[in-house]
Amino acid sequence: MTQESLETRRRREGAALFVAFAACVPLANWMINHVGAACVAHGPCVIPVAPGLSAPSGVLVAGLALILRDLVQRRLGLVWSAIAIVAGSALSATFAPPALVVASTVAFALSETADLAVYTPLQRKGLVRAAFASSLVGLVVDSVVFLSLAFGSLEFLPGQVAAKLWMVLLTLPALQWLRDRDRRIGLWPA
């Protein structure tokens, strides 16, 4: 592949990842009120995430967002990653009640910033290691902030952390494949 075609590929993949990442916040907010094994009165719809643990249903998408942000940064760079955080937060206002929008926007912004702060210095040591470490930090920050602001309770904290960790772990083989493919074709991070 020529350098020009590699650059085009990097930008196209980056654009797709940007859209997927920005869509995570509104999708997670929509799921919290519409998808679940049970919907708590004046609270979230919840799903079982491990034996004895439940979490608001949007947790699955929130866990995926942590990895997608890292990939947006890998493909498009730090500035586009920050723009994606803002875009996702703005989109959430169209899919959720104001209180949930505030909680998810603040949690999203703080957790993704924490993820970015860990991922950025580690990325040169390896995509999978950096994404895993940064996601661990991000998922804890997101869970504590979101649950505190949205529901005034950390009742679902163990379930939130477990579900997001499952999502991160499930993506690691894909990250490994992507890293290996990028090396094979000579596609380097932005």
Image (cartoon, rainbow, N blue to C red):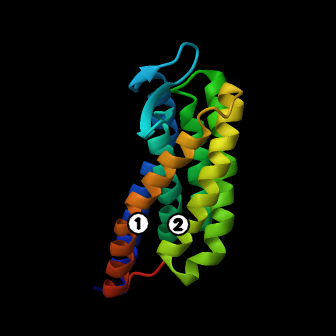
Residue at 62%, 36% in the rendered image: 104
Q: Toward the viewer: 19 or 66?
A: 66
- Decide: is 189 above or below 41: below
In the picture, the disc for residue 121 is none
Residue 89 in the image: x percent, y percent?
60, 40
The part of the image, by quadrant, that contains residue 41 is top right
- Decide: is 60 above or below 167: above
Q: Is residue 108 visible?
A: no
> Between marks 2 and 1, how big is the CA–CA gap?
8 Å
Numbered disc 2: secondary structure: helix
- Decide: is 162 above or below 67: above
Residue 71 in the image: x percent, y percent?
47, 64
Mark 2 or mark 1, which has the lower sequence index? 2
Residue that carries the numbered disc 2 in the rendered image? 132
Number of dots carrying numbers: 2
Residue type at numbered disc 2: Phe
Residue that carries the numbered disc 1 in the rendered image? 172
Residue at 31%, 84% in the rendered image: 185
Residue type at numbered disc 1: Leu
Residue at 57%, 20% in the rendered image: 43
Placement of the N terminus among the 4 image quadrants: bottom left
CB within 8 Å, label 2 to label 1:
yes
